[in-house]
Image (cartoon, grey):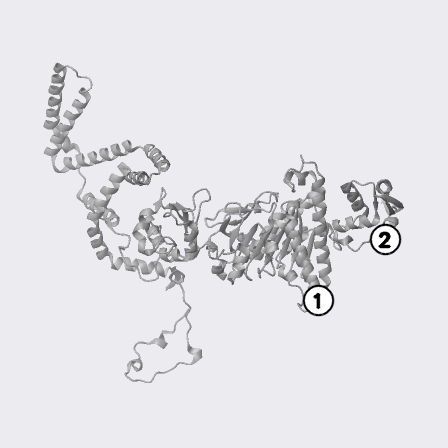
Amino acid sequence: MTVDLAKHNPDDASDDETGAELQLRPPGDVELYDALTAREQLARVVIMGWARVVDGNTVTRARAVAKQSPWAIGRLVKWAPNGARRAVTLTREWVTDAETLRLLAKHEAAGEGESYARVNDARLKKNLTGRAWLVGVAGALVAVALLAWWAPSMFAGFLGLAVIAAVGAFARPVCREPKELAVSTVVALGLGWVAWHFGPDLAALVPRPPVWAWWAAAGVAVVVFGVLGRREDQHLVEMPIGTSPSEPGKPSAEMIVTALCRSSIVGMPVAKTDQAREEISIIAPGVATHPHGYVVELELPGGVTVDAVVDRRENLAAALRRNLSTVWPSGNPDRHPGYLRLFLGHKPLNTVRQPPWPVAEGRPISIFDPIPFFTDEENRWVDISLDDTHVAMGGASGSGKSVGLRALGVAVAFDLQTRIIVLDGKLSGDLSCIRKLCHAYFEGAEDEDVQDLLKCLRWLVAERTRRARFLASLPREENRKSRVTRDLAAKYPEQLSSIAVLIDECQVYTEYGDTRNKAEKKVRDEFLSLFTTLARLSRSVGIHLVFVSQKPDAVVLPSAIMGNCGVRVAYRVLEQPHNDQILGTSARKNGMDATKFTRKEAGLAWIRGGETADTMLGRTCSMMVDLDAADELADQAYEMRRARGLLTGQAAGEEDDPTPQLDLLADVDAELRSHARTNVHNVELAGWLAQRRPDYESLDGDELGVRLRNLGVPTPQVKVGGRTTTGIRVADLRKRLAEIATNLSNLDEE
């Protein structure tokens, strides 16, 4: 931004005249300034002949340090004595392991025997004797060197005493008789006298440092002890406003405890801060360094839960003076509810570079295994599972939910056995990357598309029934879990391979048409009924639904659907009811508040039902924002499916009708086998078929007889249960199926 200094000339006397009339500049002459952070402001200094870019922030800090150097030296000298005392105290505590001793005393006072034993065992493993020897030897060497340089006579005396003590310590264990003790004493005194006599000469042999070395050592000591002696709230130099580093420094355990006490956490009132400080236990090693921030684990005061801290995350971030998106408290499911793990990131979660997505390696996966879907606050990949469950995602427009669905669709595409059906309600093309390999792909909900959509959903309901009956017909030793498993899907791929149904913007279907139009209301009700039926009954038969909506309310995703979605993902939402509809009642009150995400934090979401923890925060795969990257991965999955002959439906070229055609004779045969009957009346058989597939609901006994006769199956009068009427015999049906199989075989040979 360029500023015309001529318009702001301080030498213009007219601006300083008392009572002068205020001159207004034309609107077009007004310069607008945007608020910029200090890190974003760069001072560019142009030098004759060439240009050099200088970070103005660094220059400002350097200038401030240079101006305050005399005062900084004075502060270091002032703080140095306190730093020396603190160094002695820290050394003593390190040698004696004072922190562990305090922890042992606390456990002993509380009667926590198990914790006391665990901490004591850990202390015994430390080499405390080695620490004492290290400090003692180092101190003795320093003392000897100083005496040799400044007091040779005292050095001689110290050396003589040391020799006498060493001889005595050596002779004491071996000399038992008085005569031996006398001899050893005389020898010790003699050697001590020799050491004392020649001590000054030995002291002269110790090289004496030059004067400048003493000044350098004194300077280093003042700096080290001065920095060590300052309080945490004392600064060596005062930086100008806006020149603080972009990444906050490492906090101390004391700072974190203070911030917790100031955050108005339930059970930790500010009035009882001292009591809370005493009850909070920092778990060793204290504040640990993490590749992306800092981690500290601690035990909260009795009766205070981690949920209470999560609920006050905003207060905690303010107390720590950190960006809200860098402060992430969480619990540990393996510990008690008051065990807090606090992660403080270097950068906001949405700006951290994610590690490579495991799915992007391009290897086949299984839908029965957890799928890497998002990274947590510590930038670790966390999995979700589609096995035996459904997924619901919700978020406002632009929150990143479609990118999350795209990532999930690309991941599922690498399960080569899974058939993918897409219902793209908003015609955005967000899922177009996987269109080429989908079993069925529908866009929008126009009048001409509705019947095809309903036909697909009806087929899914009928397919669910078929799979359920097939599972029921399997021997118990094969179907011990009463659901589709990895082994069953591998053994019966034609009957039980997984189906993933991705429904983007499902409100387009559940709120279809005009509410005042009865015909459109009937369509809308059927959409909702089919979705509900699938959500309730299809998860155990290998049909997995993923609902996505920017309007996740009770009308679009009623409890009958949400109650069967074991994985729920809440991106940024604008209203509290939407937040709780996705994550569950009172989710916002418990700290899971997706309304606090900003537009810049697209991709961040609260997740319930993940593999690591029941509720956690995550960020979906950022590489899926790039459609080119998604296309490349989808192409790999397509080629892998094509090479193995696993393309079905539209992907295999069946564009007109991707849903399987009804096979009446096969369905009749399956029903007769299921009911273990040899004869059946047409009316009874029509009822069975209607339960099997919705497409047969309009079929009555007479129409069924006509269709069977057209297919070559006779419908004579049969007697069942003492009543004789039109029906079929199993023998006639099997004979006709055998004839059809023979004809097909002959056609193949020709």
Q: Are marks 2 and 1 in contact (CB under 8 Å)?
A: no
The residue that appears at 71% across and 61% down in the rendered structure is: 450
Residue 160 placed where, x, y %? 13, 28
Q: Nearer the viewer, residue 436 or 265?
A: 265
> Where 717 falls versus 116 (above or below)?
below
Query: How many neighbours does mark 2 have within 10 angstroms: few (below 14), some (14-19), or many (20 or more)?
Result: few
Q: Quadrant of the C terminus?
A: top right
Q: Secondary structure at mark 2?
A: helix
Real-space Cα distance between discs 2 and 1?
A: 31 Å
Left or right relative to 519: residue 702: right
**Badge 1 is on which residue?**
518
Residue 118 figure quarter: top left
Position in image of residue 291 (x %, y %): 42, 46
In the image, 105 versus 355, the foreground residue is: 105
Quarter holding the N terminus is bottom left
The 10 Å Cα crowd at callout 1, few under 14, some 14 to 19, many 20 or more, is few
Q: Is residue 493 visible?
A: no
The image quadrant that residue 173 belongs to is top left
Which badge, 2 or 1, is on the more N-terminal residue? Answer: 1
**In the shown orientation, is residue 720 left or right of residue 108?**
right
Task: Please indicate whether residue 228 sits to the left or right of residue 686 in the image.
Answer: left
In the image, residue 30 sits, relative to residue 177, either above or below, namely below
- Tell me which corner region of the image, top left, top right, bottom left or bottom right, holds residue 146: top left
Q: Residue at x 78, y 50 (%)?
A: 687
How many numbered circles are shown? 2
Q: Position of residue 411 (x, y in %)?
A: 60, 48
Q: Residue 702 got which mark?
A: 2
Looking at this rendering, what residue extends furthest in the front direction?
722
Q: For mark 1, give the secondary structure.
A: helix
The residue type indicated by label 2 comes to Asp
Q: Nearer the viewer, residue 303 or 621?
A: 303
